Amino acid sequence: MLYYISAKEAAEKWNISQRRVAVLCAEKRIEGAMMVGNVWIIPSEAEKPVDKRTTRYEETRRKELKPFVKWVGGKSQLVEELEKYILSSKGVCKRKYAEPMVGGGALFFDVLARYSFEEYYISDVNPELINAYNIIREKVEPLIERLQDMQMTFLPMDASGRKYFYYSLREKFNRLSLRSDTALEKAADFIFLNKTCFNGLYRVNRKGLFNVPMGSYKNPKICDEENLRDIHEALQKVEIVCGDYTLSKSFIDEDTFVYLDPPYRPISETSAFTSYNRETFDDEEQRRLAAFIKEITDMHAKVVLSNSDPKNINEEDNFFDELYQGYQIKRVSASRMINSNAERRGKIKELIICNQEE
């Protein structure tokens, strides 16, 4: 008969923290470990895994999932820091995961690949982005076929040919309204434009028209079919919603981990990029978001929020310190990734705000 011990007992047996045991279980590195309810149990005869934290992205994890688009404010560089908040101090994770401002989904896709939440919820106000998520989930093979055709057509072209192709497709993308009969075409065009436009920006003007110029990539990977198929498989268990983050309240409860990644509060005129859509995300919107976080905190959900740190340029600017007084506020280093001048993509401080202990 197979006997099991708790994560706490395993931690004492192996002389490591209970949290570390939970991480090893989540990474599928303890053979036979399983989650019962929201706690891990481990076979009593299981051996302590070799510590491979310096090479955490290796064959022991499930299929690696990468964002299928580049996105302003993408959190790829902060994923490891943000994941420290997923497990509680006792090494227990919540049952449900919600990311109501998913964007490119850097954290979301890593969570899908590494953790086993029972329910997932993502949303965004950008209808083109959410349409792409839905098409990948429902019609990935026709999408791949379209992207492959565009890739085979675009890459052999000279500079003038590429320019004509890009701007013609951009004009068509803006002209074509998003409907059920155009959803596949719009998703393919959306991904193509993201892979070939300047720095992977998604920006619209006041009329809601995509207006980013073509980038100067030599050999952009327009169709990553393996990643798209892996995402397609993973999204089958995810609720996908197009709309305001407040709609997630019906999904969120005390057993939910919530990550919110709003358009960052600008810390300078040159960083004032909030035009993911036609609406602006100003200080009043930041306050509305804080009020929502207070609501779901009262529901006992665990909430993590990231944002810019205004103290990068003004030590006296206490906007977020005052707005989230009583919450844990951690300042971490990050890089500006989207800037026309590569030399200006330097290190800055960003905020990770949490309503519970890390």
Image (cartoon, grey):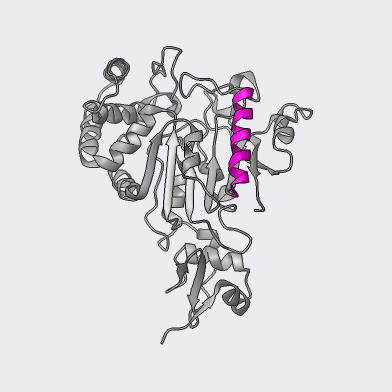
Whole-percent x and y of residue 208?
41, 16
Query: Residue at 50% across / 59% down in the picture?
Result: 55
- Is residue 187 in view from this perspective? yes
Residue reaching furthest to the bottom: 1
User: Residue shown at 43%/29% (left/top)?
Assistant: 200
Residue 23: x %, y % from top left: 53, 63
Residue at x-position 46% and y-position 67%? 35
- Residue 250 sits inside the magenta stretch: no
Residue range highlighted in magenta: 283-300
> Is 297 in the magenta?
yes
| Vertical comparison of 234 with 71: above or below | below
| Residue occupying the far top of the picture | 207
Instruction: State the quadrant of the N terminus.
Output: bottom left
Vertical position of residue 355 compared to residue 35: above or below: above
Query: Residue 212 at x, y = what percent?
Result: 42, 19
Indicate the quadrant where residue 153 lies: top left
The single residue placed furthest to the right in the displayed view is 316
* Res. 104 visible in picture: no
Left or right of 205 on screen, residue 87: right
Q: Is residue 290 left or right of residue 197?
A: right
Instruction: Tell me where residue 95 appears, x and y as whole percent.
Output: 48, 56
> Which one is in front, 356 or 276?
356
Q: Main secondary structure of the magenta part?
A: helix
